[in-house]
Amino acid sequence: MIVCENLVKIFQIADLEVLALQGLDLTVQRGELMGIVGVSGSGKSTLMNILGGLVRPSAGQVIVNGQSLLKMSNAALDRYRRTQVGFVWQQGARNLVPYLNARENVELPMMLAGFSAREMKQRAVDLLQMVGLAERQNHYLPELSGGEQARVAIAVALANAPALLLADEPTGELDTATAQTIYDAFRQLNSQLGQTILIVSHDPNIAHHVDRVMAIRDGKAASETRRNHRPSVPADQLDPAAETHPVFEELVVLDSAGRLQVPKAYREALGIGQRAAMELTDEGLLIRAVAEERGGVGGTAVPATKSSTDKQPPTQTWRSRINRWFKRS
């Protein structure tokens, strides 16, 4: 559904160039429910705006539903935004018209697309029923709670049957219980319609609500967390009625050139500076600090004096430190 290769976006602010995306790679399958996370300024909102056709990339390749957004004319990009993508924004004012009721808000995009009055009303009612608001279709915004307004916004975003649904912090202004209803609505739409959905969020628990989460750091894909369901007992003792629990596995992401990001906390814990030694071992790839740069990024240098760990083989020493760090994390 989505293929981004070496995606770059540079914003010009006065005489300053800001590099928002630095060669980001991303693949999203059709019908996937996925989360995008990252700190402010990491590039996640820029990515969403590019996928939504609101911002053109500076370089690289971005293909959505078989269409190259980089090569589209302005007119084609307008059609793409109207017909191929739906938006759900964090701010309610960007989603809904205050002087229209819930059903009329859902009908508005269809009116602009040329639907008949009968088609508009039937589809609007169907979408509101799908998000659990059929009985609230004649209510205006002041009569709807924050969670209900968010669900109306989802119905509006689906009015023209877009191939891709993008949600930017849809639960950012909601309490935990209300946010859960919004995530449930996304899950239901994904299951019933096979809708491809990308949710940009600061919520660290979003992995509990989607199938996969990609973390962006400094404009690049840094890691990926997958959600799996595994039995809570060993396979040979499996009871068909046994309860299963979600298991989350975080994987580091390598770009097309084989580069990966080592988190700052890991580098500081292991005393890795601007250079590191890399070895291929029986257990995999080992990255360790070099003696002359031991001390980390911006940290205090590690003393060169010998300790009890110096009696171990160097490879085993650093492997032990890495294992201890991952256990603490």
Image: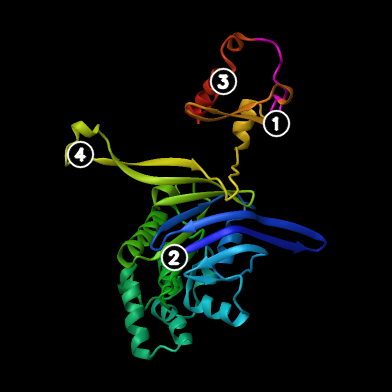
Amino acid identity at mark 3:
Thr
Say which of marks 2 and 4 sits in front: 4
Q: CA distance from mark 2 to mark 4?
A: 36 Å
> Can residue 229 be found in the magenta stretch?
no
Pair 4/3: label in front: 3
Earlier residue among tags 2 and 4: 2
Give coordinates of residue 283: x percent, y percent. Answer: 47, 27
Does 302 sit above or below residue 11? above
Q: Is residue 78 above or below residue 172?
A: below
Report the quarter where the N terminus lies. bottom left
Which badge, 3 or 1, is on the more N-terminal residue? 1
> Where does the magenta region start and end?
294-306
Label of residue 273 in the image: 1
Residue at position x 50%, y 27% from top? Answer: 328
Kind of residue at badge 1: Gly
Q: Which residue is mark 3?
A: 315
